[in-house]
């Protein structure tokens, strides 16, 4: 009896733009919440860098969004060719 392996399932290939947008929105919301409600606490405890971290996450989300848009376009092109 040959040692047969079951066929491998196809890898998941979901659209990635919604994940990039969710990350952008999450960084923006957290940054705004910290800025509006916790600004005094952040400055009193020396954690102003948390705001800069949120800003960096938000800004780095735009190149990520561009990459994911290209990825999704290539995914659509691959699926049409199949």
Image (cartoon, helix red, strand yellow):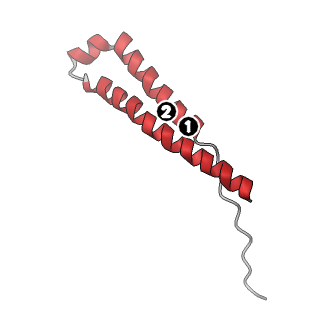
Where does label 2 land, which residue? 23
Rendered view: 5 above or below 55: below
Residue found at x 67% / y 48%:
76
Per the image, label 2 sits on a secondary structure element best described as: helix
Q: Residue furthest bottom?
A: 1
The circle on residue 19 is 1
Per the image, label 1 sits on a secondary structure element best described as: helix
Q: Quadrant of residue 8?
A: bottom right
Q: Is residue 22 left or right of residue 51?
A: right
The circle on residue 11 is none
Residue found at x 46% / y 40%:
64
| Quadrant including the N terminus | bottom right
The x, y position of residue 74, in whole percent, is 61, 51
Rendered view: 56 above or below 38: below
Q: Is residue 40 left or right of residue 37?
A: left
Q: Are marks 1 and 2 in contact (CB under 8 Å)?
A: yes
| Quadrant including the C terminus | bottom right
Residue found at x 70% / y 60%:
10
The x, y position of residue 66, in whole percent, is 49, 39
Q: Residue furthest right?
A: 1
Cα–Cα gap, marks 1 and 2: 6 Å
Q: Is residue 29 left or right of residue 52?
A: right
């Amino acid at each position: 009896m040959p040692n047969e392996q079951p066929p491998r399932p196809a890898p998941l290939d979901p659209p990635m733009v919604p994940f990039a947008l969710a990350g952008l929105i999450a960084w923006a919301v957290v940054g705004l919440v910290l800025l509006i409600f916790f600004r005094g606490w952040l400055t009193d405890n020396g954690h102003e860098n948390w705001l800069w971290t949120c800003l960096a996450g938000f800004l780095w989300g735009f190149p990520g969004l561009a990459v994911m848009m290209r990825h999704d376009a290539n995914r659509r092109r691959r699926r049409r060719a199949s």
